[in-house]
Amino acid sequence: MLRLVRFFFFKPSKVLLFTAVLSLQMGNLLKVLTCTELEHGPNFFLDFENAQPTEGEREVWNQVNSVLQDSENILFGLHSYKGAGQEIRDAIQNPNDLMLQERAWNLVCPLVIKLKKFYSFSLRLEEALKSLLVSLTCPPLTPTQHLEREQALAKQFAEILHFTLRFDELKMRIPAIQNDFSYYRRTISRNRINNMNLDIENEVNNEMANRMSLFYAEATPMLKTLSNATTNFVTENKTLPLENTTDCLSTMASVCKVMLETPEYSSRFSSEDTLLFCMRVMVGVIILYDYVHPNGAFNKSSKIDMKGCIKVLKDQPADNVEGLLNALK
């Protein structure tokens, strides 16, 4: 149980409030209450390493877990993506050399199938995010209470954001993706004009190719997908107050900021990778908040302490945060 002890000292012109937390609930939650909480909202310690689903979380957790369990394979596939740049250049420079044309085409087709796999995963991730938003924002509990009581779902929300930023960081370093896909579309169009039917169109038809083209044209396609999903969630759930969603995001940002800037809490993690995890999650929820909230995350009325979050990032090793600071910019 969580026991809250308050000490009041009365002086002529002011009241000093000291709030202390004395215990941990099920080993997963340490609530940090300070006087500044009245202004900036509650802060929590979320056990990103060990949180396990309760019976009430199990159904949604299983649905989301079936998506997340494929995330590492997606990242591995993206990391190993080599592209067909040289073969494409050879084919373009020698348009009458059928062997070079066939060589480039045979190399590009499997790459396009791989790109379709990445795109399809983004659609699954979008649905997983919506399921979590439903669970973490629905009445009668406040978003803060949801995050307190449903730590395993909060952890999955964080894992989706962590994956998203990792994917986009990798994608930005691989210009071959758009070059390969552009060559594929040009070749398909040319062959269609020549009335040639290609087997790959059974895998990636024109409609799919158009959607994939829009996806990969984004600098950060996964984050764009999640931002659109969050915005659509708010639009589609008109009876749900906007604050339920934005408070969920701002509270998560506060959670990560406190864990990163407070040695007492960051030292509880068994791996330094968890600190980078917290940084990515913090940046991810800030960007989602910026998309969803009418005034954005950088407005003075924002419930996110932007100066504090940026300071926390700048206090980290530059190599760890350069991409994250760029994402905020």
Image (tube, grey):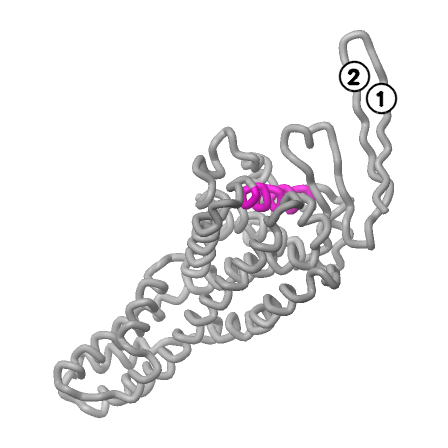
Does residue 89 appear left or right of residue 122 in this picture? left
In the image, what residue occupies the spot 83% across and 34% down? 20
Q: Amino acid at mark 2?
A: Val
In the image, what residue occupies the spot 53% across and 59% down? 129
Q: Magenta stretch containing residue 249, yes or no? A: yes
Tell whether label 2 touches label 1 (CB within 8 Å).
yes
The dot on residue 103 is none
- Image: magenta residue range: 244-258
Circle 2 residue:
15
In the image, what residue occupies the spot 22% across and 92% down? 99
Mark 1 is surrounded, within 10 Å at the Cα level, by few (under 14), some (14 to 19) or many (20 or more) other residues, namely few
The image quarter containing residue 178 is: bottom left
The image quarter containing residue 88 is: bottom left
Q: Residue 63: x and y, percent?
A: 60, 68
Q: Amino acid at mark 1?
A: Phe
Q: Residue 66: x and y, percent?
A: 59, 72
Eyeballing the image, is 102 above or below 304?
below
Residue extending farthest to the front is 239
Magenta stretch, main secondary structure, is helix
Does residue 225 appear left or right of residue 136 in this picture? left
Does dot 2 land on a helix, a strand or a loop?
strand
Eyeballing the image, is 216 above or below 22?
below
Nearest the eye: 73 or 130: 130
Circle 1 residue:
8
Q: Residue 72: x and y, percent?
A: 57, 71
